Amino acid sequence: MDANKRTVAEQELLTIARKYDAMIVLRFADNQLGKRTFVDAADQAKWTGSQDLDIEGMAEAILSGQDAGGIRTDMLQGRADFPVMTLTAPLQQEDGQIIAALFLHTDMSRISASIRQVWMDVLLYSCVAVLMAFLAVSYITGRITKPITDMNATVLRFSKGAFDLRIPTQGQDEVAQLGKSFNLMAEELDNLEQSRRTFVANVSHELRSPLTSMRGFLEAMQDGTIPPEEAPKYLDIVIAENRRMTAMVNDLLDLARIESGQYTLNISVFDIQELIARTILTFETRIDAAQIQVSLDFCEDRCYVEADADQIAQVLRNLIDNALKFTPEGGSLALSTKKLERKLVQVRVADSGRGVEKEDIPHLFDRFYKAEKAHTPGSQSGTGLGLSIVKRIIDAHGQDVTVESQPGKGTVFIFTLKRAERPPANGKLAQRREPPNSNNSERKANGREQ
């Protein structure tokens, strides 16, 4: 090797030894050069016990090409007080001739310390990450479970009758939607409870008043306050009150059966116009007494519908009875049918009474509601159940019933039924059965009220 190049190479090897805290040993194939050791002067004492290591056997194997070199960690075991990694490799010229065997011993203390530090950093960061994840999960879980916990507490209080409670809701997530649904349910239940209380109060009032009246008349006749010759007059009053109470109880039973679903529909095909004509005949006495003009305007000779004939007959009775109550003497009553699109038949019951105030119309189908401020109460005043029964029967058929009225221009009730394109198979109108607990064919509709 050229002397100048060798000097440069030796300086380069010393620089590498200094940089990597290493000791470099070269065993040349040229016996004249022999073995050369390169180590930084500051580290000379550290590597003193390692310089006399016998490497001749390994060097001969590398120089002869039998050993391609590699990395070992046990070569200086017992000779150094620190971990050492040894790199062995052949040095070749450009023509491929091996000129020396390289042994590079490097101190692994710093590397081991760095690896330990990396592991400590990884452990520390892992602990921090786990702690942060725990806090985040705890926070998120709290945000999710707190509304559910509050909801559960509210439900428990709600089950004990606190129907005015509501759940605060924020956001649009699933829990917020559940809270909104619960509030909606609570609102409906609260309204239902208010309706129940009002219903019980109204029933109590409607029953107490006539019972008190009847008791007073009967006690007066018993103790002689009412003379015997006048007893028949007061007995007629007692009987009339009893009939009114019986009609109200019957309506309550019908309404309860319809709302509970116990009253099943018996769908048949029948002529609605024939049913109207036959129903209006049951009111003939009252119509003649009040000199009311009745007009029937039918769309065709026959108009068949699919419905429960018994319940539709009750609808007609209630609406006609309601119209007669508030139609003045000499007034008019008009019933008509009309075929609509979507295979429907429209039935209209119109009177020439005083009509209903605008603010009363939305409540006409409420139970026990009376719009008597639009009419003069009299002996025909009802209890407010007839129109409520009408509404529920028509709803059960999947159809609509509406009201049109203006003060001084009368009132019109309109409901629809499903039209049938063919007559019944036997060619006859379905026979109408009288509802249970009916004492007469003219069931009371209980006024233009629900």
Image: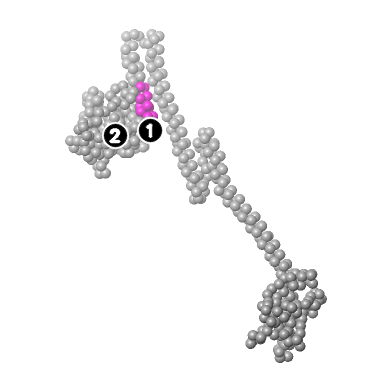
Dividing the image into 4 quarters, which one contains the N terminus?
A: bottom right
Q: Nearer the viewer, residue 6 or 169?
A: 6
Residue located at (66% from left, 60% from top):
125
- Please give the residue where the numbered disc 2 appears in the rendered image: 267
Q: Secondary structure at mark 1?
A: loop
Q: Amino acid at mark 2?
A: Ile
Mark 1 neighbour density, 10 Å: few (under 14) some (14–19) many (20 or more): few
Q: Report helix, strand or loop for mark 2.
A: strand
For residue 261, which numbered disc appears in the image? 1
Would residue 301 be found to the left or right of residue 56 on screen? Answer: left
**Residue depicted at 61% across the width and 55% down the height:** 133
Q: From the viewer's side, name the closer residue of 315 and 447.
A: 315
Quarter-wise, where is residue 321 in the image?
Answer: top left
Please name the residue shown 68% across and 75% down the image. Answer: 70
Q: Is residue 413 left or right of residue 222?
A: left
Vertical position of residue 181 compared to residue 24: above or below: above
Q: Quadrant of residue 127?
A: bottom right
Earlier residue among tags 1 and 2: 1
How far across and down, in percent of the image, does residue 158 sit?
A: 52, 36
Q: Is residue 257 magenta?
A: yes
- Whether residue 286 is visible here, answered yes or no, is yes
Q: How many marks?
A: 2
Residue 183 belongs to the span the image colors magenta:
no
Labels 1 and 2 touching (C-beta < 8 A): no
Quarter occupied by the C terminus: top left
Left or right: where 177 falls relative to 268:
right
Label 2: few (<14), some or many (≥20) within 10 Å?
some
Q: Position of residue 348 (x, y in %)?
A: 26, 36
Q: Main secondary structure of the magenta part?
A: helix
Task: Find the residue positioned furthest to the left.
Answer: 301
**Magenta region, residue range:** 244-258
